[in-house]
Each structure stands twice: as C-alpha cells, then as structure tokens.
Image: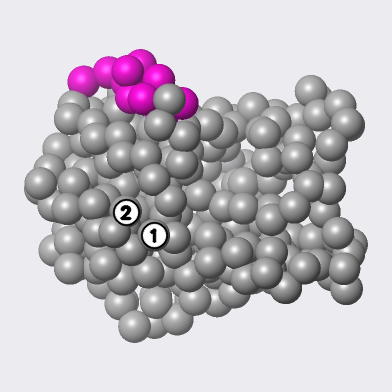
Amino acid sequence: MPVAVITGASRGLGRALARELARREWHLVLDARGAEDLGAVQAQLPGGQHHALAGDVTDHTHRAALVAAARALGGASLLVNNASSLGASPLPAFGDLDPATYVEILRVNLVAPMALTAALLPQLRRHDGRVLNISSDAAVEPYESWGGYGSSKAALDHAGRVLAAEEPELRVYSLDPGDMRTRMHQDAFPGEDISGLPEPETVVPAVLSLLDGDLPSGRYVAGELVKVAA
C-alpha cells in the first residue's frame, strides 16, 4: 500500500484528503498541532495503518518523527504540505505586520514544508514520489492585508519549482485550492458569513487528478483541474 504524509490533517483540506486516501487503502502519517482533533480524525479512518503525530511542523524533532513513521510503513510516496499559518487575525496591512509574526509565517508556510520535503527525499526518490504544496491565489494576486501569507506562499511556489528542476524524477505540485469553508478562511475574515463557500471535500477530486494522472510538475488551480477532469 502507498504511504502519504499529510500535514495540517486535523481539519479542512488535510482532513478531507486523509479520509479519501484512507478509503483508497493508503497508509497515512498525519500531522497537526492539536492532539485531540487529530486523534478524532485518525479514529474515523477506515483500513490501513495510520499514525497520528501531534506536534509543530516547525520543530525539527517532530519532523524527524514524521519521517521515521513513514519509513516504518515502507516509505512515503506522497507528501502533502498543507499546514499553514495566517499569522494574525484580522490580517494587518503589510506595513503594520509585526516582523516577529512575519518570521513565524515564513517558518510555518515556507521553511517547515521545504525542510520536511528535504528530510523525506530519500523515501520519495525510491517510490517515484509526489510532493503537493498547498498554495493560494494570494501567492499571485496582490490582495490588501495578505502580504505576509501571500508572500510566504509565493516563495513556497518558487521553492517547489526549484525542487522540480533538481529532482526531475519526482512530481512537485503547487495547488491553489480556491476559497473554502475552513477555520483559516474564517480567521482571515472574522465576523463575516462564509457559509456560502464550498467545503474542502469539493477540492479532493482536483488533488486526486494530480495524484492519479501524469501532469508535469507545476502550479495548478483546483477549479481548472476539475473542469478538465469533467
């Protein structure tokens, strides 16, 4: 059975993808900060061997534990870098963004996923693996107040392009999932009604098109992938 490492798996797109891959009989290594929420996700997953490791993906020791868990299952063939941080809510203008907060955003959204990718490279190489970095339209559009988050995702997109050039046997994807009804989106727009946004589960078919197909490494938009699949 294939093995996937999914960060930020306790809710949102990470949880939805974990459920679908478990249904497909993947073995999973799941990461999130909240042990209770992550344990609840693990308890609901069908079949396979699933390891839920609560911790901070910016911590080297925690990343090493994720790598070891994947190795024990036979080695990762997929890494989903889904864990992200807005840094502050409500989002401040770029000029008002506290430097310490900005550094933390970069640590979570850029440094940690690339460090975890690097640590898993020996496993991914053996399995002709795929890396999926969850991006955002804020990585390419200059939305006011999204400077910290958007620039971190833009940097992650480019880091993925460099990795793809260095590791041509791997598939390295950046995926813009579009707006979703998630806690992070609510935190970005406190007090606003986001009930009309699609659930994260609606993005899973786009992810599967990247995992099941032969698309080259690159940046993709979920809505466009679903249209092509249809």
Tell me: residue 215, above or below residue 208.
below
Tell me: residue 173, above or below residue 41.
below
Residue at 52% in and 42% down: 206
Q: Which mark is residue 169?
A: none
Q: Is residue 216 left or right of residue 108?
A: left
Q: Is residue 90 left or right of residue 151?
A: right
Tell me: residue 193, above or below residue 158.
above
Q: Residues within 10 Å of mark 2 (few under 14, many from 20)?
A: some
Residue at 68% in and 41% down: 184
Label 2: state its secondary structure.
helix
Q: Amino acid at mark 1?
A: Asp
Quadrant of the image occupied by residue 187: top right
- Determine if the magenta segment contains residue 41: yes
Residue 37 position in % (x across, y down): 46, 26
Residue 224 position in % (x across, y down): 64, 49
Which image quarter is the N terminus in? Answer: top left
Spatial CA distance of label 1 from label 2 is: 5 Å
Label 1: state its secondary structure.
loop
Along the viewing direction, whichever of 89 and 123 lies nearer the viewer: 89
Q: Is residue 73 left or right of residue 146?
A: left
Which residue bears the numbered disc 1?
Answer: 59
Q: Decide if residue 111 is in sight here.
A: yes
- Determine if the magenta segment contains residue 29: no
Residue at 30% in and 28% down: 22
Q: Which mark is residue 62?
A: 2
Q: Residues within 10 Å of mark 1 (few under 14, many from 20)?
A: few
Q: Decide if residue 228 is in sight here.
A: no
Q: Amino acid at mark 2?
A: His
Along the viewing direction, whichever of 99 and 143 lies nearer the viewer: 99
Contact between marks 1 and 2 (CB within 8 A): the answer is yes
Query: The magenta stretch spans which residues?
Result: 37-47
